[in-house]
Amino acid sequence: MTKEQLEQIKAVIVEKRDQLRQEADRRKTNQNSSTSSGEHANYSFHMADQGSDTMEMEQKYIFASREGNFLFHLEMALERLQSGEYGICIQCKKEIGFERLLAVPHARLCIKCKAKEERTKRMRSASPDHQSDESISE
Ligand SMILES: [Zn+2]
């Protein structure tokens, strides 16, 4: 991949990441406003006392969500971009390819290995917790 292509993909990732972060923030704000009014005022005051525990729970909540999970994978992709490991298939060590990365910027498998994985997954359908990271956006 050329430097320009990498820059292009980086821009896509950063844009998606910022979008997801904003969504997560908005959700957090909504939650706060709904608990600080009316009958729940006492409850939210009590929650505020617990400080960092609440923060930690919020963080966990965000990352447990579908968007949060995706956000995590985008962050990982950015790290790989920085370290120069980006765009290499973790299975066969070949280049994943620009077109695929543009469509799925957090992809870690090339299209061939991905197809192979899909087949394996179908055979292993008895174990639902064996899910691919990439199933998130595809
Ligand atoms: Zn591969």
Image (cartoon, rainbow, N blue to C red):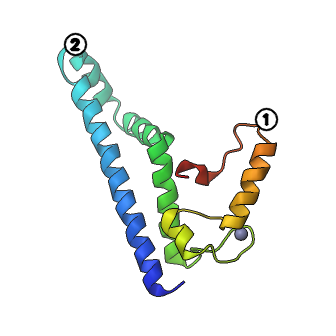
Taking the image in four quarters, ligand 1 sits in the one at bottom right
Check disc 1 and report the residue beneath it.
126
Amino acid at the residue labelled 2: Glu
- Residue farthest along the right direction in this orientation: 123
Quadrant (top left/top right/bottom left/bottom right) for the N terminus = bottom right
Task: Please name the residue shown 80% across and 42% down the image.
Answer: 124
Q: Are marks 2 and 1 in contact (CB under 8 Å)?
A: no
The answer as to whether callout 2 falls within 8 Å of ligand 1 is: no
Mark 1 element type: loop
The number of numbered badges drawn on the structure is: 2
Q: Quadrant of residue 115?
A: bottom right
Task: Please name the residue shown 71% across and 43% down the image.
Answer: 130
Classify 10 Å Cα crowding around label 1: few (below 14), some (14-19), many (20 and above).
few
Residue 88 falls left or right of residue 34: right
The label number, if any, that marks residue 39 in the structure image: 2
Mark 2 element type: helix
Task: Please name the residue shown 62% across and 73% down the image.
Answer: 96
Q: Quadrant of residue 43?
A: top left
State the residue in front, 47 or 61.
Answer: 61
Amino acid at the residue labelled 1: Ala
Q: Do we see residue 80 in this rendering?
A: no
Q: Where does the image place residue 128, in percent across and percent down from the top left?
A: 71, 37
Q: Where does the image place residue 133, in percent across and percent down from the top left?
A: 61, 52
Is the residue 70 above or below the residue 62 in the image? below
State the residue in front, 39 or 107.
Answer: 107
